[in-house]
Amino acid sequence: VPAKTYDTGAYHEPGPIGILFKIVHAFLYLVQPNTFPQVLNHFVLVLKLLSMLLPFSTKNVVLTLQAIYYEIGFIVSAALGLLFILLLPLVGLCFCMCRCCDNCGGEMHQRQKKNADCQRSCFATFLFVASLIIRQVVGVLCAYAANQHLTNQVRGAKKLVNSNFKDLKIFLNNTPAQIDYLVSQYNTTKDKALSDLNMKQEDLEVGIAVAIRETKEALENVSVSVEVLQEGTERLHANLTDAKMHLSNTLNDSACSAAQAASTCNIIRNSLNQLNINANFSGLPGVSSQLAKVNDVLKIDLSSLVQKVSFLTGFLDSQYRQSNFSHNIKNVLESIGSNITTFTKMLPVQKILADLTIYLTQSEAYVQDYFPVVEQYDFYRWLGCLILCCMVVLILVFYYLGLLCGTCGYDKHASPTTRGCISNTGGNFLMAGVGFSFLFSWVLMIVVVLTFVTGGNVEKLVCEPFEDKTLFKVLDTPYLLNQHWKNYLSGVLFKNPNINLTFEKVYSDCKENKGIYTSLHLEYLFNINEFLNISMYTEDVALKIEHIQINLSKIILLDEIGKENLLNFSSSGIERINFAAYLTEINKSVTKVDLLSFANDLQARADQLPKGALENALKGHANNIRMIHNQQVIPLEQAMSTLNQSIRLLKRTSSELMVKVKNVIGAVNAAQLLINNNASVVIVQETKKYMDTIVGYFEQYIAWVKESIAMEVAACKPIANVIDTAVDIFLCSYITDSVNTFWFGLGGSSIFLIPAIIFAVKLSKYYRRMDTEDVYDE
């Protein structure tokens, strides 16, 4: 079945950021290790049992406890986040008021300690490690990368959306063409059946008549070829004798007596004996007597014999058509074709596809219109997330500047009251970072908690179950989506919730690119088996075949004269032909020497002689010998090739001839006996066999149609691609993974604000200029 290629690849590779996604998935597994299907199935089961036994309020309590059990990890984490949101600003407020009262490090006085340098170094190191490397570098970059990744994917999503719409249009437009293709292939099957209906079985002419004709042609070729060879060799012998005589006269010229030419002339003179014929066809026996006997056999009306014997298998037109078998079979073929056409018209395919095409076009236009709005709102989201990242970066900058100025401007020889301006500025930067930490921390944590609860639950409740198909199993839970329906999908499509049609099976079949007829169990709407049942058409034909009566008692397939002529053919004397004599002469060359080689050698020796009449005469003889080869030897070689083929055919035929004739006569006698005694029964049997053959063609066609409709027609891979694109790619890979990575990075930064605040407050005491200091009298 013709199939189109779809462009959409419903698979997303996140790239390097995928490492962060895996880290977040591992963290979510620690937060929520409960297996989704078992918990929810238990939840649904408890709901069913208690809905009948317990009052409504008690049932709500049970449901709440089940939900709390499943969400306990998220609840605890969100509760900690809420404590952070509430307590950190409150702690910051109390901390500021405490410092205003010269407590909590607010007193501008630093007591001298022996390990002051060690404490300062430790606080600076802890602040740098905890605040900058772990929190700021990893956290901010992680959040920014997730934010940018989501924006990039949203911008590139339009291409993927268009690809899905394109595939759906191909799916809708290609389906009618596939159905038309299935219908059109019926004509191929019907033409094959009608062709067989008009064919004759293999004639006996192949067995014996062809052998007779081939034998006759071979004998004629032998006779003609021998005659041609005999005449040709006589003419060639005369020409070679004449050429040899003239060449000998030339060599007897006085010019050959010269010292320079004597040796060459002697060599040529000694080779003249080679200019003779080699094969002698004059003594070969003729084949005229065998040819005459074969011509007598060919006077038999073999075509009449063939038609009579072929009737035995049910294909003699004059008697065969009396049974009306051909007419009945043709009626069956036309009925099937008409029924298939009617069936395709009854299918509501065109209306359904037209409605789906309109809906698809409207949906595509809607998406195209609102996609700029989505990009605009995504820009606002990107800008808001960037501002949150900048809040953390601002704190980072203050801590960086505080560490840089404090470290560079610190003078260990200066007293707390005489510290330099740079050192004092570093301390002020650290305290500014602490202040902004208290101001921004609760805002950051609110965003983290909201995105954590939302993104984490989407990952655990949708994405992970979708990946291992457990989400479909939950949707297929009996009476879940509709308390009166066992199977929701079949209830919607067929108004029969008892049909075993599940979301998981439909998705899996479409994922494997099976036909939508199989995936959606459309046999419950229109069953193709009822329209493609050939047995309902052949019952009447089979009944008529049982009553076929044909009288063949007067038919004689082969009379005694015909048998005698066939026996005469087998004893025509072909086997007595002297094949060895023929093959011996055929295997010889026409001449004793290759005339072309002799002529070339003669010309080469003439070139060795001095320029003159002798040289020219020898070259002329060489050209004459070449002409003899081209005009006489080559035709003789062709005639020898024809004779060789004919003799070998006759030799092979003679060994099989008697067996073939006896087999033919035995088959004709058996056929005659069968015709005289039991012809009608045989014809009925053969007719049934042939009808079974014709029916077999259509059974194969129907089986192919069913298989094609089930597996290839309207293959619903695009539907699975749309689901994968919407859930697996858009919702999970693009949005959920990015959101989860964002709160993971931002939350890590927010958590590490607490130790950073402590270390920054402690460290600022060693960088800022104090108002008073400890004074010791000597």
Image (tube, rainbow, N blue to C red):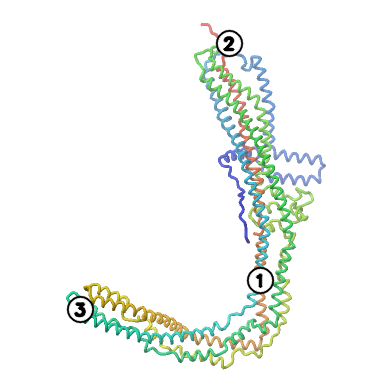
Three-letter amino acid code at the position of disc 1:
Lys
- The single residue placed furthest to the right in the displayed view is 55
Q: Given this view, does label 2 or label 3 mark the residue nearer the observer?
A: 3
Which one is nearer the viewer's eye here, 250 or 574?
250
Q: Given this view, does label 1 or label 3 mark the residue nearer the observer?
A: 3
Q: Which residue is drawn at 22% across and 75% down?
A: 612
Q: Which badge, 2 or 3, is on the more N-terminal residue? A: 3
Q: Mark 2 points at which residue?
A: 772
Q: Which badge, 2 or 1, is on the more N-terminal residue? A: 1
| Residue 248 image-quadrant placement | bottom left
Rounded to the nearest angstrom, the CA distance separating label 1 from label 3 is 87 Å
Q: Look at the image and tell me whether residue 28 can be seen.
A: yes
Mark linked to residue 256: 3
Three-letter amino acid code at the position of disc 3:
Cys
Three-letter amino acid code at the position of disc 2:
Thr
Q: What element carries label 2?
A: strand
Q: Which badge, 1 or 3, is on the more N-terminal residue? A: 1
Which one is nearer the viewer's eye here, 604 or 664?
604
Q: Mark 1 points at which residue?
A: 190
Q: Residue 602, how many percent across, how many down?
A: 27, 76
